[in-house]
Image: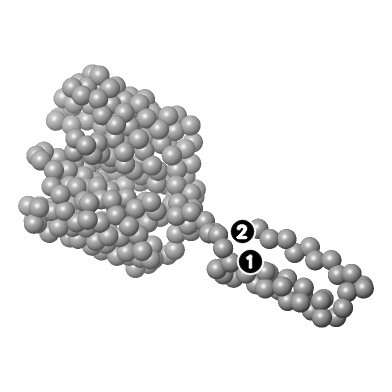
Amino acid sequence: MKASLNFHFESKKSIFSVFVKYNIGVSVLACILLLAGCGGSSSSSDDTIVQPDSVAGLWFGQVTTIEGESEKVLMAVSPKGKAVMFSEASHNALIARGSLSENTFLSDDTMLYPGTGMTRHGTMQASALQNSIDGSATLSGTVINFSAVRVSSTEDVSLTDIAGNYSSSWNEGLYTRSFAIDIDGIISGSDTNGCLYSGVVEPFNAVDALFDITIKADACFDDFEYKGLLAYGVFPFEYQNSINHRKGVVIVSEESSGAYAFRQFSPQN
Protein backbone atom coordinates (compact mmCIF):
# COMPACT_ATOMS: atom_id res chain seq x y z
CA MET A 1 0.00 0.00 0.00
CA LYS A 2 1.36 3.42 -0.90
CA ALA A 3 0.21 6.74 0.58
CA SER A 4 1.31 10.35 0.15
CA LEU A 5 2.15 12.45 3.18
CA ASN A 6 2.50 15.75 1.26
CA PHE A 7 0.46 18.04 3.47
CA HIS A 8 0.61 21.75 2.72
CA PHE A 9 -0.35 24.04 5.55
CA GLU A 10 -1.29 27.52 4.43
CA SER A 11 -0.70 30.33 6.81
CA LYS A 12 -4.22 31.69 6.41
CA LYS A 13 -5.91 28.45 7.55
CA SER A 14 -7.34 28.30 11.04
CA ILE A 15 -5.65 26.47 13.88
CA PHE A 16 -8.53 23.96 13.88
CA SER A 17 -8.07 23.18 10.19
CA VAL A 18 -4.35 22.57 10.70
CA PHE A 19 -5.09 20.36 13.68
CA VAL A 20 -7.54 18.21 11.67
CA LYS A 21 -5.11 17.79 8.78
CA TYR A 22 -2.28 16.94 11.16
CA ASN A 23 -4.29 14.18 12.79
CA ILE A 24 -5.36 12.75 9.43
CA GLY A 25 -1.69 12.58 8.47
CA VAL A 26 -0.79 10.83 11.71
CA SER A 27 -3.59 8.29 11.14
CA VAL A 28 -2.39 7.52 7.64
CA LEU A 29 1.21 7.18 8.82
CA ALA A 30 0.15 4.86 11.64
CA CYS A 31 -1.78 2.76 9.14
CA ILE A 32 1.33 2.37 7.00
CA LEU A 33 3.63 1.52 9.89
CA LEU A 34 1.29 -0.98 11.52
CA LEU A 35 -0.09 -2.46 8.27
CA ALA A 36 -3.50 -2.02 9.87
CA GLY A 37 -6.75 -2.72 8.09
CA CYS A 38 -6.80 0.37 5.89
CA GLY A 39 -7.60 -1.56 2.73
CA GLY A 40 -5.49 -3.79 0.47
CA SER A 41 -3.12 -6.64 1.14
CA SER A 42 0.61 -6.40 1.83
CA SER A 43 1.76 -9.52 -0.08
CA SER A 44 0.78 -12.70 -1.85
CA SER A 45 1.02 -16.12 -0.20
CA ASP A 46 4.00 -17.01 -2.42
CA ASP A 47 5.98 -13.97 -1.23
CA THR A 48 5.21 -14.34 2.48
CA ILE A 49 8.31 -14.47 4.67
CA VAL A 50 8.63 -17.98 6.08
CA GLN A 51 8.61 -17.93 9.88
CA PRO A 52 10.97 -20.12 11.97
CA ASP A 53 8.17 -22.55 12.88
CA SER A 54 6.69 -22.69 9.38
CA VAL A 55 6.18 -26.08 7.78
CA ALA A 56 7.29 -24.62 4.43
CA GLY A 57 10.78 -25.70 3.39
CA LEU A 58 12.93 -28.81 3.04
CA TRP A 59 13.12 -31.60 5.63
CA PHE A 60 15.09 -34.85 5.89
CA GLY A 61 14.19 -37.70 8.23
CA GLN A 62 12.42 -41.02 8.66
CA VAL A 63 9.04 -42.42 7.69
CA THR A 64 7.33 -45.72 8.42
CA THR A 65 6.28 -47.55 5.26
CA ILE A 66 2.97 -49.25 4.53
CA GLU A 67 4.72 -52.49 5.44
CA GLY A 68 5.71 -51.08 8.85
CA GLU A 69 9.41 -50.62 8.06
CA SER A 70 11.44 -47.42 8.34
CA GLU A 71 13.24 -45.54 5.57
CA LYS A 72 14.93 -42.20 4.97
CA VAL A 73 12.94 -39.56 3.14
CA LEU A 74 13.23 -36.03 1.86
CA MET A 75 10.12 -33.96 2.49
CA ALA A 76 9.35 -30.62 0.87
CA VAL A 77 6.46 -28.24 1.57
CA SER A 78 5.78 -25.25 -0.67
CA PRO A 79 4.17 -21.98 0.48
CA LYS A 80 1.45 -22.65 -2.11
CA GLY A 81 0.18 -25.70 -0.19
CA LYS A 82 1.82 -28.69 -1.85
CA ALA A 83 3.87 -31.27 0.06
CA VAL A 84 5.97 -34.11 -1.37
CA MET A 85 7.96 -36.94 0.15
CA PHE A 86 10.54 -39.19 -1.54
CA SER A 87 12.52 -42.28 -0.56
CA GLU A 88 15.57 -43.26 -2.60
CA ALA A 89 15.53 -46.78 -1.15
CA SER A 90 12.02 -47.79 -2.25
CA HIS A 91 11.26 -45.00 -4.75
CA ASN A 92 8.04 -44.41 -2.83
CA ALA A 93 6.65 -40.94 -3.45
CA LEU A 94 3.91 -39.07 -1.62
CA ILE A 95 2.18 -35.95 -2.92
CA ALA A 96 -0.33 -33.95 -0.89
CA ARG A 97 -2.30 -30.86 -1.79
CA GLY A 98 -3.57 -28.92 1.19
CA SER A 99 -3.29 -25.73 3.22
CA LEU A 100 -0.75 -24.07 5.52
CA SER A 101 -1.83 -22.33 8.71
CA GLU A 102 0.86 -20.96 11.02
CA ASN A 103 3.02 -24.04 11.72
CA THR A 104 0.70 -26.76 10.40
CA PHE A 105 -0.07 -28.45 7.08
CA LEU A 106 -3.36 -30.27 6.48
CA SER A 107 -4.46 -32.22 3.41
CA ASP A 108 -7.44 -34.37 2.49
CA ASP A 109 -6.02 -34.89 -1.00
CA THR A 110 -2.95 -37.07 -0.44
CA MET A 111 -1.61 -39.69 -2.84
CA LEU A 112 1.07 -42.30 -2.15
CA TYR A 113 2.85 -43.65 -5.22
CA PRO A 114 4.68 -46.85 -4.21
CA GLY A 115 7.77 -47.84 -6.16
CA THR A 116 5.61 -50.63 -7.56
CA GLY A 117 1.89 -51.14 -7.30
CA MET A 118 -1.21 -48.97 -7.28
CA THR A 119 -1.60 -45.54 -5.77
CA ARG A 120 -3.22 -45.13 -2.37
CA HIS A 121 -5.40 -42.14 -1.47
CA GLY A 122 -5.81 -40.52 1.94
CA THR A 123 -5.13 -37.58 4.23
CA MET A 124 -2.07 -36.01 5.83
CA GLN A 125 -1.24 -33.68 8.71
CA ALA A 126 2.09 -32.20 9.84
CA SER A 127 3.24 -29.66 12.40
CA ALA A 128 6.57 -27.88 12.76
CA LEU A 129 8.40 -26.60 15.82
CA GLN A 130 11.58 -24.65 15.13
CA ASN A 131 13.80 -27.05 13.14
CA SER A 132 11.74 -30.24 13.35
CA ILE A 133 8.55 -31.52 11.77
CA ASP A 134 6.31 -34.43 12.73
CA GLY A 135 3.17 -35.83 11.22
CA SER A 136 1.26 -38.73 9.76
CA ALA A 137 -0.70 -39.78 6.71
CA THR A 138 -3.63 -42.16 6.57
CA LEU A 139 -3.62 -43.99 3.24
CA SER A 140 -6.28 -46.55 2.36
CA GLY A 141 -6.83 -47.11 6.06
CA THR A 142 -3.13 -47.54 6.93
CA VAL A 143 -1.28 -44.91 9.00
CA ILE A 144 2.33 -43.95 8.32
CA ASN A 145 4.25 -41.64 10.63
CA PHE A 146 7.16 -39.36 9.79
CA SER A 147 9.64 -37.16 11.62
CA ALA A 148 12.32 -34.95 10.08
CA VAL A 149 14.64 -32.00 10.66
CA ARG A 150 14.98 -28.91 8.50
CA VAL A 151 17.52 -28.92 5.67
CA SER A 152 19.14 -25.50 5.86
CA SER A 153 21.08 -23.65 3.20
CA THR A 154 23.93 -21.24 3.91
CA GLU A 155 23.35 -19.28 0.72
CA ASP A 156 20.60 -18.37 -1.71
CA VAL A 157 19.96 -20.95 -4.43
CA SER A 158 19.04 -19.69 -7.90
CA LEU A 159 18.29 -21.28 -11.26
CA THR A 160 21.96 -20.82 -12.10
CA ASP A 161 22.90 -23.09 -9.17
CA ILE A 162 20.63 -25.95 -10.24
CA ALA A 163 21.62 -25.76 -13.90
CA GLY A 164 23.38 -28.97 -14.92
CA ASN A 165 23.06 -32.53 -16.17
CA TYR A 166 21.29 -35.18 -14.09
CA SER A 167 20.76 -38.91 -14.46
CA SER A 168 19.18 -41.74 -12.46
CA SER A 169 19.08 -45.50 -13.08
CA TRP A 170 16.82 -48.29 -11.85
CA ASN A 171 16.58 -52.04 -12.25
CA GLU A 172 20.33 -52.53 -12.08
CA GLY A 173 20.95 -50.04 -14.85
CA LEU A 174 18.38 -51.43 -17.29
CA TYR A 175 16.42 -48.18 -17.12
CA THR A 176 18.06 -44.74 -17.16
CA ARG A 177 16.53 -41.28 -17.28
CA SER A 178 18.75 -38.29 -18.10
CA PHE A 179 17.92 -34.63 -18.39
CA ALA A 180 19.42 -31.17 -18.34
CA ILE A 181 18.34 -27.91 -16.72
CA ASP A 182 19.67 -24.64 -18.18
CA ILE A 183 20.15 -21.31 -16.39
CA ASP A 184 16.64 -20.19 -17.39
CA GLY A 185 15.07 -23.26 -15.80
CA ILE A 186 14.28 -24.98 -19.10
CA ILE A 187 14.30 -28.81 -18.97
CA SER A 188 15.17 -31.26 -21.73
CA GLY A 189 15.81 -35.00 -21.48
CA SER A 190 15.06 -38.59 -22.44
CA ASP A 191 15.05 -42.15 -21.09
CA THR A 192 15.89 -45.63 -22.29
CA ASN A 193 12.24 -46.27 -23.17
CA GLY A 194 12.35 -43.51 -25.78
CA CYS A 195 10.39 -40.93 -23.80
CA LEU A 196 11.31 -37.30 -24.41
CA TYR A 197 11.04 -34.75 -21.61
CA SER A 198 10.63 -31.00 -21.60
CA GLY A 199 9.54 -28.55 -18.95
CA VAL A 200 10.30 -25.58 -16.76
CA VAL A 201 11.52 -24.92 -13.22
CA GLU A 202 10.38 -21.82 -11.32
CA PRO A 203 11.66 -20.60 -7.92
CA PHE A 204 9.63 -19.69 -4.86
CA ASN A 205 10.43 -16.27 -3.40
CA ALA A 206 9.83 -17.35 0.19
CA VAL A 207 11.53 -20.77 0.37
CA ASP A 208 15.16 -21.26 -0.62
CA ALA A 209 16.29 -24.30 -2.67
CA LEU A 210 12.69 -25.30 -3.48
CA PHE A 211 11.14 -24.88 -6.92
CA ASP A 212 7.88 -25.42 -8.77
CA ILE A 213 8.32 -27.81 -11.68
CA THR A 214 6.31 -28.83 -14.72
CA ILE A 215 7.49 -31.76 -16.87
CA LYS A 216 5.98 -32.89 -20.16
CA ALA A 217 6.58 -36.45 -21.36
CA ASP A 218 6.23 -37.05 -25.10
CA ALA A 219 6.72 -40.04 -27.42
CA CYS A 220 5.96 -42.44 -24.54
CA PHE A 221 3.16 -45.01 -24.35
CA ASP A 222 1.09 -41.91 -23.59
CA ASP A 223 1.83 -38.19 -23.29
CA PHE A 224 1.61 -36.65 -19.82
CA GLU A 225 2.17 -33.37 -18.02
CA TYR A 226 3.52 -33.73 -14.49
CA LYS A 227 3.38 -30.99 -11.85
CA GLY A 228 5.23 -31.02 -8.55
CA LEU A 229 8.30 -29.79 -6.69
CA LEU A 230 12.06 -29.85 -7.18
CA ALA A 231 14.40 -29.66 -4.19
CA TYR A 232 18.11 -28.87 -4.50
CA GLY A 233 20.83 -29.63 -1.96
CA VAL A 234 22.89 -32.37 -0.34
CA PHE A 235 20.51 -35.15 0.68
CA PRO A 236 22.23 -38.00 2.57
CA PHE A 237 20.50 -40.96 0.97
CA GLU A 238 22.34 -44.23 0.62
CA TYR A 239 23.34 -44.04 -3.02
CA GLN A 240 25.51 -46.51 -4.92
CA ASN A 241 26.48 -48.30 -1.68
CA SER A 242 27.57 -45.16 0.15
CA ILE A 243 26.09 -42.01 1.66
CA ASN A 244 25.60 -39.28 -0.92
CA HIS A 245 27.52 -36.05 -0.20
CA ARG A 246 27.09 -34.37 -3.58
CA LYS A 247 24.58 -31.67 -4.34
CA GLY A 248 21.73 -32.84 -6.49
CA VAL A 249 18.01 -32.66 -7.13
CA VAL A 250 14.98 -34.56 -5.94
CA ILE A 251 11.93 -34.28 -8.18
CA VAL A 252 8.48 -35.50 -7.18
CA SER A 253 5.56 -34.66 -9.46
CA GLU A 254 2.33 -36.25 -10.64
CA GLU A 255 0.03 -36.49 -13.61
CA SER A 256 -3.08 -36.40 -11.49
CA SER A 257 -5.66 -37.40 -14.11
CA GLY A 258 -3.80 -40.67 -14.71
CA ALA A 259 -2.37 -41.02 -11.18
CA TYR A 260 1.18 -41.41 -12.47
CA ALA A 261 4.20 -40.08 -10.61
CA PHE A 262 7.51 -38.74 -11.93
CA ARG A 263 10.21 -39.18 -9.29
CA GLN A 264 13.95 -38.73 -9.49
CA PHE A 265 16.99 -38.41 -7.23
CA SER A 266 20.05 -37.25 -9.16
CA PRO A 267 23.37 -36.11 -7.69
CA GLN A 268 24.91 -33.50 -9.95
CA ASN A 269 27.72 -34.65 -12.28
Image coordinates for residue 162, horizontal then vertical, percent: 43, 37
Residue, disc 2: 1
Q: Residue at x 20, y 24 (%)?
A: 222
Instruction: Work out whether residue 70 can be spotted.
Output: no
- Distance from label 2 to label 1 (Cα)? 8 Å
First reached walking from the N terminus: tag 2 or tag 1 = 2
Residue, disc 1: 32
User: Which residue lies most toward the bottom here?
Assistant: 16
Q: Is residue 114 left or right of residue 263?
A: left
Residue type at mark 1 is: Ile
Q: Quadrant of the N terminus?
A: bottom right
Q: Quadrant of the C terminus?
A: top left
Q: Are marks 2 and 1 in contact (CB under 8 Å)?
A: yes
Q: Is residue 50 left or right of residue 97?
A: right
Q: Is residue 214 left or right of residue 43?
A: left
Question: How packed is label 2: few (under 14 Cα within 10 Å), some, or many (20 or more)?
Answer: few
Instruction: Give the secondary structure at mark 2.
Output: loop
Question: How packed is label 1: few (under 14 Cα within 10 Å), some, or many (20 or more)?
Answer: some
Q: Residue at x 48, y 49 (%)?
A: 205
Image coordinates for residue 89, horizontal then vertical, percent: 18, 44
- Please say if 114 is above or below 138: above
Q: Nearer the viewer, residue 32 or 209?
A: 32
Instruction: Give the secondary structure at mark 1.
Output: helix
